[in-house]
Image (cartoon, grey):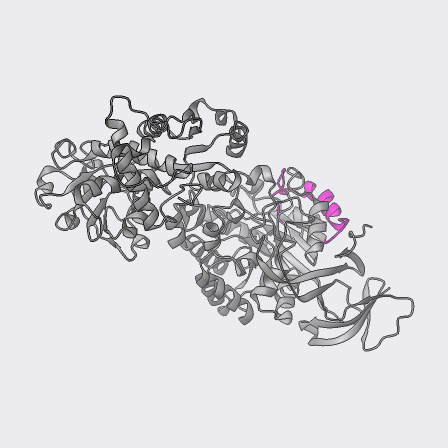
Amino acid sequence: MKRKDMLGLRDSTAEEIGLILDTAARFRSVSERRIKKVPTLRGRTIVTAFFEDSTRTRLSFDVAAKRLSADTLGFSASSSSTKKGETLMDTARNLDAMKPDAIVIRHPCAGAPHMLAQAFPWSVLNAGDGINEHPSQALLDMLTMRDHLGSLAGRTVAIVGDVYHSRVARSNLYGLPKVGARVLLAGPGTMCRPQMARPGVELLHRVDDVLAEADVIMMLRIQRERLAPGMMSTSREYARFYGLDLERLERARPEVLVMHPGPINRGVEMSPDVADGDRSVILEQVTNGVAVRMALMYLLLGGEPLPPGGDDAAAS
Amino acid sequence: MLLLRSARVVSPPDQLDAICDLRVVDGRVAEIGVDLPAGDSKVIDCRGRAVLPAFVDLVAELPDPGMSWREDLRSGSLAAAAGGFATVLVSPVNDPVLDQGALAQGLVQRGRGAPGARLLMAGALTMGLDGAELAEIGSLLDEGCVAISDGGRATKDLSILRNALEYARPFGAPVLLRPGIPALESRGCMHEGAVSMQIGLRGIPAASEEVGLAAIIALLRLTGGRVHISHLSTERSVTLLSQARAEGLSITASVAARSLVLTDEQVSLSGYSSATRLLPPLRPESDRRALCRALADGLLDCVSSDHQPWTRVEKEVEFERCEPGAVGFESAFAATLTALEGDLPLVARVLACRPAQILGREVGIRVGAPADLVVVDPNVQRPVGPPRYSRGVNEPLRGQALRGRVELTIVDGVVRHSLTDRPTTR
């Protein structure tokens, strides 16, 4: 891949997305073995810098790097010198002095990864910036969809909930149309706005509006901490118009996939029986997350596209 | 004595636009003519150059005292002169805020003695610019302030604003206000629209400025008095302004020079550069074009530098966390000339004549008038560099290829900036 950084899917091409997903599919077998490690990134240093709390994403990047034999070190906002007033650029200058090869960054401000990518020679992987993008999550969503649906061209993906504040949704809004999928948006008027519609992306309203056509229903987490006053009413009202329960799911296509980027507010955007039901692929998303992040690190740090063939090609 | 030789002299109030020579003696224009004898005058060859009335800026921040690492009166005055400004109205955003008569005296004097452009002071509208209690508006004006300003903070409480306008009216000085509704701006950091949605930044809707302006106009109708809108940035605001003027209200407005060149796309193109974080924010192309048109049609009065210097420390942070504002003195002329397609008489009107009239200052190039003059090269085209005199580093126009350059700024007959020399000090 000819790029230094993965900042978002807004500026990625369909070819790049295809290459990342193909590479991820090949790396998946590493996690199935008894010895879950290949020497591909031996001697390379990857820093995970999380300026915002995260469990799943941070562990996923960490385990991905370790399975490629990279040395990893990480810090989170609560333990770092940012608490003592150091600026992001100064923190980054110090990291730079330790000669890393790549930095995985999550930050509450949109554009923070872009700022580092412009200023430093190492690769920057955006693990979520403000309400902007979270590209590795959208890629793992696409890999999961591809596992079940084959090609995504011509498929319909519904994204339901707080699209406005969701970096996962924003990355999917860029990525999915590039691989030929059609996107339907549903959610409260404060969270799904007319400016989001464009070719390949349609704006609807209630969850009921998307059930009949969707091959995939992606439910988004309501992030109360991001909401300004007046952006939603009660959780009960939310569930009534925008929540997914079994009764609604029965009106969807029988083979529909139910996805969620996690963590779930059970009983708000999704009832527990749907989250744990047989249409849910939520835990497959987590498994694919490791493979996608292995592929991103491998390709950004100069790995050649893997030749077609056996699952162990990545080990050489 | 100076003799500006063979310049295109442009002065709209004097219906003057001709190639001629211009002699300056004792701080005043002494002679305008063709082939004037050199005599004892220092001759400056101005072939291919234009001479305009020097610029007057109504919207600039020089946070001295209090935050003079960002800019002090000296560096600000020199930067302004380098941009062709002879007169700058300084916003009361210092610390302590210029809200009491006793604070004004020293500052007014320092401003008059500044080494580049002359600095005039605007006093605060409310104590500490907090929008809660009236500042000593009368005393500030008595002690030499020439205007009253909200310092770019949109006033939250409309009853305070109403009373402030009533109170200021009999003193006669213009009141500078930024239209905006703080509650609609609180978490936003760029124009709300397609671009903010694309790049994941919370927006400030144009409605904030338009509701704020509609409120100011309605109050002005109630109170009478003079208002100058310090930051106007949308097409609909222009409509509101011209309706207010059509019914006879005394309201004028400035637009920041950079808003005539840049749009909200620049936030995305620059990769979230903190220099593009502004208040009011950069607007879409349709607004940019409407603002240029409004200047040409005379609906919009002035172009300001909206100079708001920040150092690297304050701007080298995440876009969402940095302070809004950008430097503007040294790029304002080129931005204006480029946006107005080289129309020098129009540039003279919006950068010099209208703002001078709003401050009640004499303006124009005629025999006997004070020699506040700027010599510009209107043809050179070059990319904007970093500021040379200002301490601020936040120049969103950096790298833009703009037309025109200030070569010489003359204040009261004294050269205060020359492209080739350092400015002279008194």
User: Eyeballing the image, is B351 above or below B177?
Assistant: below
Q: Nearer the viewer, residue A27 or B131?
A: A27
Residue B168, image x and y in percent? 58, 53
Is residue B111 magenta-colored? yes
Q: Nearer the viewer, residue B293 or B59?
A: B293
Is residue A173 magenta-colored? no
User: Eyeballing the image, is A20 above or below B350?
Assistant: above
Question: Residue B129 occupies which quadrant of the picture?
Answer: top right
Residue B233 appearing in the image: yes
Q: Using residue B253 as the reference point, say whether residue A248 is left or right of it.
A: left
The residue drawn where x is 14% and y is 31% is: A276
Q: Nearer the viewer, residue B393 or A304?
A: A304
What range of the chain is rendered magenta?
B91-117
Residue B258, image x and y in percent? 56, 57
User: Eyeballing the image, is A142 above or below B87?
Assistant: above
The residue drawn where x is 25% and y is 40% is: A143
Residue B226 appearing in the image: no
Residue B134, image x and y in percent? 56, 44
Question: Residue A250 occupies which quadrant of the picture?
Answer: top left
User: Eyeballing the image, is B151 above or below B39?
Assistant: above
Please give the count of numbered marks on the rendered protein: 0
The residue drawn where x is 69% and y is 71% is: B11
Residue farthest toward the right in the current orientation of the protein: B40
Quarter of the image that includes the N terminus of chain B: bottom right
Residue B158, image x and y in percent? 46, 49
